[in-house]
Image (cartoon, helix red, strand yellow):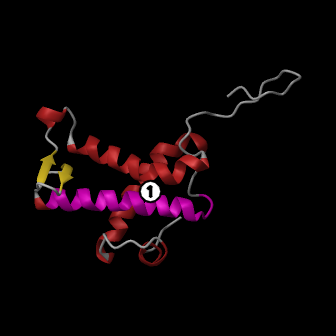
Amino acid sequence: MQITYGYYADEYGGKTIPEQDFRKAEKQAEAYIRHLTYVKGDIFAVENDVVKDAVCAVAEVYYKYNAQQQSGTPLVKSENNDGYSVTYVTEQTDGKTAEEMVKKKAYDAVYPYLLPTGWLSRKVGVRCDHKCRCDSL
């Protein structure tokens, strides 16, 4: 399933990613979502707007990360508007690399879309051989 820029802009309502940068971010988002859901099968085998929205949300995370990497500015960990405070991710103090932070942000972006669908569950459905035919999940 390939999400078009038209879907991103019109259906999802995205404004963060410029059209010329969308394809790269969308590919990274699809790869990340495949990584999360591979146990359950091919999430992209069937057209699904919820999955498309999840890809758009993660694509925005990857676009921001790519833009920050190109510009050389550090990844923002948190911001506060009241007294204008910005905290940047640093390996030494946080114990996490920028890549780990981007994965966390990508997971946070995909979570509300895919959790209700069951795609984020790592359980593999197995039926028991008892007469009751109970699910041993």
Q: Is residue 48 magenta?
A: yes
Q: Position of residue 108 (x, y in %)?
A: 39, 48
Q: Reply above or below: 93 against 128.
A: below
Q: Is residue 58 left or right of residue 7?
A: left
Q: Position of residue 62 (x, y in %)?
A: 31, 57
Range drawn in magenta: 45-70
Q: Position of residue 100 (x, y in %)?
A: 28, 41
At 57% from the left edge and 53% from the top edge, which residue is drawn?
A: 43
Q: Is residue 106 left or right of residue 55?
A: left
Residue nearest the observer in this picture, 61 or 83: 83
Residue 136 figure quarter: top right
Q: Is residue 107 magenta?
A: no
Q: Is residue 128 left or right of residue 75?
A: right
Q: Reply above or below: 21 against 109.
A: below
Q: Are there few (<14), some (14-19), or many (20+) residues within 10 Å of tag 1?
A: many
At 34% from the left edge and 43% from the top edge, which residue is drawn?
A: 104
Q: Is residue 61 left or right of residue 39?
A: left
At 18% from the left edge and 53% from the top edge, which residue is drawn?
A: 80
Q: Amino acid at mark 1?
A: Glu
- Say which quadrant the C terminus sits in: top right
Residue 50 visible within the image: yes
**Residue for badge 1:** 30
Main secondary structure type of the part rendered in magenta: helix
Residue 33 visible within the image: no
